[in-house]
Structures are given as structure tokens and as C-alpha cells.
Image (cartoon, grey):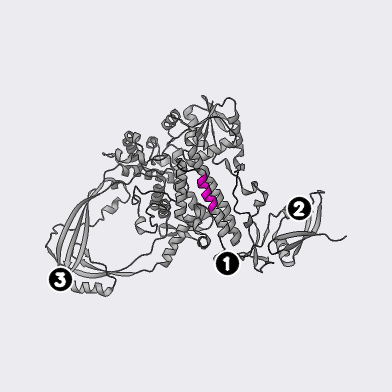
Amino acid sequence: MKLILAEKPSVAQSIAKVLGATKRGNGYLEGNGYIVSWCIGHLVELAQPESYDERYSKWQKEDLPILPDNWKYQISAETKKQFLILKQLMERPDVESLVCATDAGREGELIFRLVYHQCKCKKSFERLWISSMEDTAIKSGFANLKPGTDYDDLYEAALCRAKADWLVGINATRFFSVLYHRTLNVGRVMSPTLALLVQREADISAFKPVPFYTPFLDCGGFSATGEKCAEKAAAQAVVDACKGQPALVQTVEQKEKSERPPAMYDLTTLQRDANRQLGYTAQQTLDYLQTLYEKKLCTYPRTDSRYLTADMEGTVPALAAVAAKICGVAVPDTVLAAQVCNNAKVTDHHAIVPTEGAGRTDLEALPAGEREILRLVARGLLCATGTPYRYQETVVILDCGGNLFSAKGKAVIDPGWKVYQREIADMAKESVLPNGLTEGKTLPVTAVSIKEGKTTAPKHYTEDTLLSAMEMAGTKDKVNCSSGAREGGRGRIPEDAERKGIGTPATRAGILEKLVSTGFVERKKQKKTTYLIPTQIGVSLITVLPEQLQSPLLTAEWEHQLKEVERGEMNPNEFMDGICNMLHDLVRTYKVIDGSQVLFPSDRETVGRCPRCGGAVTERKQGFFCENAECRFALWKNSKFFTVKKKNLTRAVASALLKDGKAKLTGCYSEKTGKTYDATVLLEDTGEKTNFKLLFEKK
């Protein structure tokens, strides 16, 4: 028997159906020589710090950094039942080998390997690597299974990613939370993304608009623009010189130009277009796409490739016909399949395209979100395989009163691929210059005017533009993410730009959602556009974080190194050493920012006064802490002194300890006798350490 492990029950059912494993068991399907089961996401996770040492249950600066020598793992409590089922299946004597059929990517590999190792399984395994859940793709994948060892480097990269996120998340979050006395979530990818948002808002706040003045000629059928002037008087001088004067055509230049189609969609470009055109968040787009994948209507979603492989070229015309049906347009006469097939530009998975089966589905039966995303994917395929957009551009230079003016016109020759875009109506608005404009011709000027303008500030980030900034961070040219040229639609980023990027296509949506859920970022809608704006606490966090934790370029370099580990070009230990060294330096050298009380104002009710500095002590989830960032006084709720007595350090007890130095406790549990007793607890603070003592009343 072969044991096949998928990532989700729905995927396992699709595989089992193709393989003929139809007999249902407890947590698996069986038949025809196969057992098919599933993992339900991450069954096995990196263990929490307290599993290494009980003292780590408290957040204390002196314990940092926590750097495990031998990593421990834990089984998720919610999915332990399924883990035990998988363990039993692996141990079955009739199971000779396994097939890893989790999602074909870094995280899918990690999910399978952690379960495999946690079950102490030694049986050989193969890898199923497919980009579509269609029956034909599954059959082909099983006919071409790869040795599991071929993906060892992918697993190492996935494990490095998980460990690095654990190390940075656990240590930096505890470190800054303890220093600034409030929970401050810090993440290897999350914090640099927040830094991009904070920097953009700083650029907007610091921006000073600069006025400019542009002379205009109205020549009846069209208008011509003069050179911008920094001073209004200079523009007025041009206008005065032109009044009552005709315009002389100096040059007329006509050129035929073309615009190549954009490449097909990878996940990030699809998320960007879905955000701009449909208003969907990155997470919504990924969720819709994942469901379409599991319904066998589109190919694998978590890809960073925008091309197909050369062996797919023959299938492209059929896929274009499917795409046309989905979009409700005629099947294109010309499908340029060769321009979308390039092996050198395909990594683990090819671009996102509809499956052939999508042409047979009832689109109206799909939920609206899935239907719109499927249409967007289909339109992307039609555009990418279309002919170039061709137009004639005319540039006219006029002389009026000794001043030069220019006018530009555009006439569409062939809409090409743009016929499939939603913006097709905009082409009809292109300015067309009148016929008969020739060099030396004199034109009447009906009006001369000045148009006043101001330079504009950078725009707030939308999910579209932030995803672009995340993707392009760390490129060779260090693309300026605040550049207005980068704000437009897809296809403007050079195809050959080396991407390092913050996060991966698979993780960026989750990062944005976590920034919102932790209160560092909020979505603000203005008219029809939703912007991502950092909150006050988000700005304060970036203000106190050192460069290595907020640098988009450094994080992009880490992502690049993970890719090198994945390709076997970098030793995993080298990557992990870099993370550990950074954390050592952080804890050793970082100093609390002066005046941080202003950055992190507390709206909590005061429980009492700090016995060390007299500052306000307020309640938080972990305990009662002094609001003074330079003071480290704390009363921990999970203090062993109270827990062994089966008592809680309540707000009332904490208040009494701070006010009187003592508090009465009733019903304390005795470990020696098993009985309960009453006593008074005394608070003793040395200025560096807090101790408790019990005082018993004399009978």
C-alpha cells in the first residue's frame, strides 16, 4: 500500500477519486492499493518557549535572546486527533511507502516533513508536484512522481523560514514589550512592511507643494502646451507675447508605436489588479483563488511566475478559447502562444490560468467573488496571448510670439490585447489632432491662458501599491517605492528586474491582515479607494525599532537567502547564524528611546503607584507593569508564588500590595497537606527584584 498525505480533506478526496480509493475510513480513504489522508494545515508546530524552560513563561529581558540548540515541536491541540490517525497509518505494516501530496511549495513541504519526522517514520516517500487539481493533471503527476530527497533543500528553506520567524517574533516581541510596557508584536516580515507604510506617511506629511504655471494656446480644434514656469510673471510674459499673434507650425512628427501585452498573472499581480479593479483585499483574492484551485477551475495560486513552460505551448489555444467563454467574448482569431511560454522564467509553478474544465462550469452558480477572480484570470490569459496594441502618435511643435508650444495626439491603429481590458473605453478618449497640420502652416489662436498647478504629494499606499513595494524591495536598482511611476497598473515593473522582495506571494496577504488585526494599520476608505494607514501605535513602534528590524532591504536580502537555501546555494546554518547574531546584538546594544512615554501613552486605569519610581502601574494581559519605560517593575499574573497556592494575582490583590505592601489571601492551597489556609502576603521589592513572603496571624 502507498500512503498519500494531502494538505486538506477536499484535495485528498479529489486525489482519492482519481486513484480509485473510495472506501471511507476514520480520517482517510482507501482502495486500489492506496490510502489517502490529509494534514489539515500545520499539525506540527515549533514549540513555545516555556517548553524549553519554565522560566520562559514570564517575559523577562534577562532571559533574551531565547535561542534553542535543539528545536522542539508540538502537536496542535485542535488537530491532535488527525495527527494520531496519520501516525497509525504510517505504522501500518502494509504501508510500504508514502507520497507527499501537500501543496507543491515551501510551506506544503514543511507541513508534510514535520508530520513525517514527528511520527518517527523511516519509510521512503515520493513527491507529487502538480499545478492543477484536474483529473488529468493528478494522473500525470502520479505517473511522474519525484524522489522525496529531490526536495530536501526546499524543506530546509521552509524550516529556516519557520525558525527565523519564531526567533525574531518571540525575542523581539518580548524584548520591546518588556522595555515599553505594552504588547508590541514584532515580526521578521511584518515590521519592515509596517516601516514602508510609516515612511510613506512621513513623506506625505513632510511634502511641501510647489506651484507652477503653464501657458496654453487654444487653436480651435486642439490646444498646445508651453513650458512650465516656476514664476507666474514668467508665464504671464509668455501670454502677453502671444496675444493677437498666430501660431506657426514648426514641425510635425508622426510615429507608429506599439505596446506589448503584459505577462500573465502570478499571485501578486493578480492581487494588485483585484484590489485596484474590484476592491478586494489581498487575502480575499488568495482565498477566492484557493477555492477555485480546489474546485479544479484554475491552476495553483501561490506562484511567482508569469509564464508557462514550453511543453504547454500546444495547449494555449484551447485555454484561450476557455478564457474567451469565461469572459463572454469571441474566441480570438490569433493566439500568440509562444510569447507566454518561457522555461527560464518559470520557477516551481507556472502562471495562473483557467483550467480546461473551467469552460464547462456554470459561472453563475459560483459565488460572486470567485466568479470575478476567475474572469480576471481569464482576461489576463487573453491579454497575454494577444497581439500588440498599435497606435500612431503625432507630435506638433508650434511657435507663437517667439515661444514654443507642443501638442500631442494619438490615433489607435489596432487595439490588440487592450480590447480585453476594462480600460478599453479610455482609448476612445485619446486626443486626436486635426488633419492637415503641416510644417509652415499658420494657425489662428483663439485664446491664450495660464493653467496654475502644484506638485502633488506621494499617495497613501493601497494594497495594490504596497504589494508592489513589497515585491520590489531589495532589487538591484533599489527601486524607490515612493516613486509615482510605480503607482500605476501591472506591467510597468521591468520583466527582468531581479526580485528579492519582502515576504513571498504566499505570505504577503497574511502579513497585511496581521498588521490590521494587531492594530498597527487600519483601512480607510476615501471615495472608492481604500488606503492602508499606520496607526499612532504603528508609527511609534517603527520609531523605536532599530534599523535591522525595520529595514525592507535587509528583510528582502533574507528572503533572497532563503531562495538560495531552497536552490542548495547556501548552507541553512549560515542563514540561521545571521538571524541569531542579529538578535544577540539587538539585546546587547539597544537602548530605550528617551521620552518613550509620549510615544506609547497609556489609556489604562492606574492600579497603584510603582514602589521603585512612583510611576503609574497599570494592568495588562501578562500582569501589572510600571508605565515608565525605564523602570522594569512588574507583578506577573503567572507568578509561581501564587499559582502553586492555586490563587490568582487579581487586580484587587495587586492594588493592595502597591498601596500597603501587603494583601490578605484566603483559601491558599498547601502542597504538603492538601488543605487550605489563610495568610497575608507581603511585597518586598529590592529595586531590581520583586519577592513575596507569607505572614501568618498568631493564634
**Disc nearer the start of the sequence (2/1):** 1
Provide residue 494's location: percent of width, then percent of height: 34, 50
Mark 1, other Cα within 10 Å: few <14 / some 14–19 / many ≥20: some
* Residue 208 visible to the viewer: yes
Q: Say which mark, if any, is on residue 435.
A: none
Distance (Cα) linking label 2 and label 1:
36 Å
* Residue 367 visible to the viewer: no
Provide residue 202's location: percent of width, then percent of height: 44, 64
Q: Are marks 3 and 2 in contact (CB under 8 Å)?
A: no
Q: Quadrant of the C terminus?
A: bottom right
Provide residue 425's location: percent of width, then percent of height: 29, 52
For residue 450, above or below residue 383: below
Q: Say which mark, if any, is on residue 245.
A: 3
Say which element carries label 2: loop
Provide residue 63's location: percent of width, then percent of height: 63, 54
The main secondary structure of the magenta stretch is helix
Which stretch did the figure color magenta?
Answer: 573-581
Q: Residue furthest left?
A: 440
Distance (Cα) linking label 3 and label 1:
67 Å
- Residue denoted by label 1: 597
Amino acid carrying mark 1 in the image:
Gln
Q: Are marks 3 and 1 in contact (CB under 8 Å)?
A: no
Amino acid carrying mark 3 in the image:
Gln
For residue 325, above or below residue 395: above
Mark 2, other Cα within 10 Å: few <14 / some 14–19 / many ≥20: some
Left-right relation of 140 to 672: left
- Residue denoted by label 2: 645
